[in-house]
Image (tube, grey):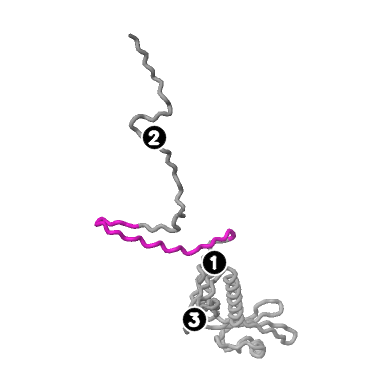
């Protein structure tokens, strides 16, 4: 007797003895991730120690037109100049000092305002730094001019038909300070030079006396 076996199964029938699986759906957590994670280190003995938070870095501002400049609200450095906000020596209020690179003393020292309703100083920003550097540069330029004027004297006078120009250059040498006296005629030629004491006073009267005495009455050495 021949029997036919059928291999056709219902597709929607579940396998015997096994429950049908339900589809899982992955969902996103409604909570936002923390802004900062704190790592915990576990030692060999099982003790846990919290890792200290990393200190924030000082902001560095870079300019496309020049080198990097550094500012943190109380100090700003750029192009060889540094401005710093420091407490006053008497402990009352604040001051700002501006130094040039290579100089031991500040070129400028001025009062600095505090924040409104606060004892903290106002932050130092780019416009304030630029204004301070401009003032310091002007102060330094005036100091150089004054120093040059104090070391270089000039007197012009006329004797008979000749016109003379007498100059005095002071040399503030630490071990041998002295002055150099020169007489130049109307053609621009240096006629005489004499070494004088550093306290020699060049005036029209002393220049006239020196010329009339044959360039030997200044109390120095002709050379």
Q: Position of residue 80 (x, y in %)?
A: 53, 68
Residue 43: in magenta span: yes
The mark that comes first in sequence, 1 or 2, is 2
- State the quadrant of the N terminus: top left
Q: Position of residue 165 (x, y in %)?
A: 68, 82
Callout 1 crowding tier (Cα within 10 Å): few <14, some 14–19, many ≥20:
some
Secondary structure under the numbered disc 2 in the rendered image: loop
- State the quadrant of the C terminus: bottom right
Apparent side of residue 193 relative to residue 105 in the rendered image (left or right): right
Q: What is the quadrant of residue 131 in the picture? A: bottom right
Q: Badge 1 is on which residue?
A: 78
Q: Badge 3 is on which residue?
A: 88
| Label 1 to label 2: alpha-carbon separation | 73 Å
* Residues in magenta, as a range: 40-65
Which mark is in front, 1 or 2?
A: 2
Q: Badge 2 is on which residue?
A: 20
Q: What is the quadrant of residue 11 in the picture? A: top left
The mark that comes first in sequence, 2 or 3, is 2
Q: Position of residue 178 (x, y in %)?
A: 54, 83
The mark that comes first in sequence, 3 or 1, is 1
Secondary structure under the numbered disc 1 in the rendered image: strand
Q: Which mark is residue 207?
A: none
| Label 2 to label 3: alpha-carbon separation | 82 Å
Apparent side of residue 93 relative to residue 22 in the rendered image (left or right): right
Magenta stretch: helix, strand or loop mostly: loop
Which mark is in front, 2 or 3?
A: 2
On screen, residue 68 above or below 197: above
| Label 3 to label 1: alpha-carbon separation | 24 Å
The residue sitting at 67% across, 77% down in the picture is 189
């Amino acid at each position: 007797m021949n029997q036919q076996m059928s291999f056709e199964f219902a597709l929607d029938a579940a396998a015997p003895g096994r429950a049908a699986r339900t589809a899982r759906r992955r969902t996103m957590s409604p909570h936002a991730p923390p802004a900062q994670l704190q790592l915990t280190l576990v030692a060999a003995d099982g003790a846990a120690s919290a890792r200290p938070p990393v200190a924030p870095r000082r902001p560095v501002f870079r300019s496309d037109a020049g080198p990097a400049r550094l500012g943190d609200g109380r100090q700003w450095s750029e192009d060889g100049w540094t401005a710093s906000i420091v407490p006053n020596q008497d402990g009352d209020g604040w001051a700002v000092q501006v130094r040039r690179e290579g100089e031991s003393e500040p070129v400028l020292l001025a009062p600095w305002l505090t924040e409104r309703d606060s004892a903290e100083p106002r932050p130092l920003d780019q416009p304030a730094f630029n204004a301070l550097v401009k003032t310091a540069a002007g102060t330094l330029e005036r100091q150089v001019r004054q120093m040059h004027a104090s070391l270089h004297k000039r007197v012009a006078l006329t004797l008979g038909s000749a016109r003379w120009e007498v100059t005095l250059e002071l040399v503030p040498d630490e071990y041998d300070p002295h002055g150099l006296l020169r007489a130049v005629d109307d053609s621009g030629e240096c006629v005489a030079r004499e070494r004088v004491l550093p306290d020699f006073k060049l005036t029209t009267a002393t220049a006239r006396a020196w010329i009339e005495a044959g360039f030997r009455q200044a109390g120095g050495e002709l050379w």
